Amino acid sequence: MPTFSKRVSTFGTTIFSEINNLAAQYGAVNLGQGRPDFDTPNDVIQASVKALTDGQHNQYPPGNGTAELRKGVADHANRFYNLDIDPDRGVLATSGGTEAVFSSILGLVDPGDEVIVIEPYFDSYVPNLIMAGAIPVYVPLHPPEWTLDPDELRKAFTPKTRAILWNSPQNPTGRVFTVEEMTLVADLCKEHDVIVIADEVYEHLVFEPAQHVPMATLPGMFERTVTINSLGKSYSATGWKLGWVYGHPDLVAGAMRAHQFVTFAVHHPSQIAAGYALHLPGSYYEEFQAMYTVKRDLMMEALTGAGIKAKVPEGTYFVLGDFSDVFDGDDMAFTQHLIKNIGVACIPPSPFYCAEHRYIAGKLARFAFCKSDDTLREAGERMKKLKQ
Ligand SMILES: Cc1ncc(COP(=O)(O)O)c(C=O)c1O
């Protein structure tokens, strides 16, 4: 008797679980998963505690999300991007950004449709497409600057293309794409009548002078873009697994149709706290960015001290380092070496590529710097041994 469906038979264990287990086994400083080792802001936690204890938020919320969350998302999009979002029909609360992407794919993409995936990609995208019966079409970013080749991108658009999975600020390259780069994508989407699933979970993790521009704000793109977001990243609450989709009501309706039969609704008290968090003042985001700028610089210092070359990230809390000057082997072997012999965990990026393009990841490792400054300094100390 086959134990797995054909749909999931090619899926292994995610690289994040594998690395977490290995890091724990060897006592490594874990710069693998993008999991902050510091807490959620206390006032956001208190908003959640209040929602848990006020006797009003422990039963099913509305399937599309609480009024507080939906208003929070609409107000936030208006405040930062001047977008006009309908809080009733243009927002959907989901179980993290992960479900937001999956429900959008299930609700907007048909079996046999082609969907363009930019590599290296966030790990759930391709399994999501496979489960939806869609066909991924891969377009790699080119190191060391992690840019798109316009001809490669253009060739990826065919009469069968339904959507592109767009991620900016981009995990794992740390790119924040420029308006010029995004305009090329947008123009091709308009020319070929393609929708954009724009994963912008790192919208507030941007380092000056880079600027995050939502795909939905480009001319003619609002009506063909759903935007994905997550409480986890901007408010250091990855464990809450609360996310959302926002955009044109006709597109959000597709994601909603899928969502109602995936989870129906998501954690009620967290949505009340999210309504609070989304209204935090501008100073919160300024301090958040300043805190992460220090962490990014500590991370870059650690990599330089270890002989690892990297483009300084423009956004996100990830950096992709090139270890070819200090280790002779592929990304999988390097990760094992770093965890077992040096005591630092990172993520090998080859699982974020199709087989044809996997060679690009050969000498690269992803490091997460959403860690305390002391943790980053300790990682830097340990990694100096790489050069010896
Ligand atoms: C690009 C990207 N999209 C989506 C997610 C998932 O977000 P969540 O943890 O809210 O499901 C992540 C998490 O790391 C991510 O990096």
Image (cartoon, rainbow, N blue to C red):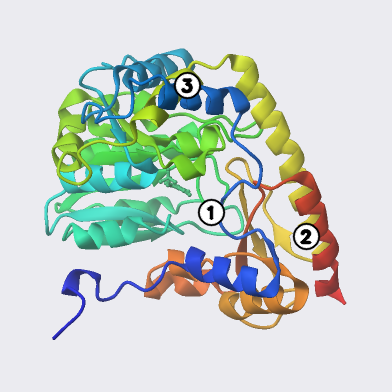
Q: Quadrant of residue 266?
A: top left
Q: Quadrant of residue 282?
A: top right
Vertical placement of residue 229 versus 365, above or below: above
- The Cα atoms of the two marked residues, 1 and 2, are separated by 19 Å
Labels 2 and 3: the sequence-earlier one: 3
Decide if residue 87 is on the left or right side of residue 302: left
Q: Quadrant of the N terminus?
A: bottom left
At x 24% / y 31%, what residue is drawn? 60
Q: Secondary structure at mark 3?
A: helix
Eye-nearest disc, 1 or 2: 2
Labels 1 and 2: the sequence-earlier one: 1
Question: What's under tag 3, amino acid-wise?
Answer: Lys
Q: Which residue is mark 2?
A: 379
Q: Are marks 2 and 3 in contact (CB under 8 Å)?
A: no
Q: Quadrant of residue 210?
A: top right
- The Cα atoms of the two marked residues, 1 and 3, are separated by 36 Å
Determine whether the beta carbon of the residue marked 2 sits less than 8 angstroms from the nearest atom of ligand 1.
no
Vertical placement of residue 60 versus 329, above or below: above
Question: What's under tag 1, amino acid-wise?
Answer: Pro
Question: What's under tag 2, amino acid-wise?
Answer: Ala
Q: Which residue is mark 1?
A: 172
- The Cα atoms of the two marked residues, 2 and 3, are separated by 38 Å
Residue 347 rendering spot, x and y as whole percentages: 57, 65
Numbered disc total: 3
In this orientation, which residue lies closer to the viewer: 44 or 248? Answer: 44
In this orientation, which residue lies closer to the viewer: 344 or 332? Answer: 344
At x 41% / y 19%, what residue is drawn? 54
Q: Which residue is mark 3?
A: 50
At x 59% / y 73%, what residue is drawn? 22
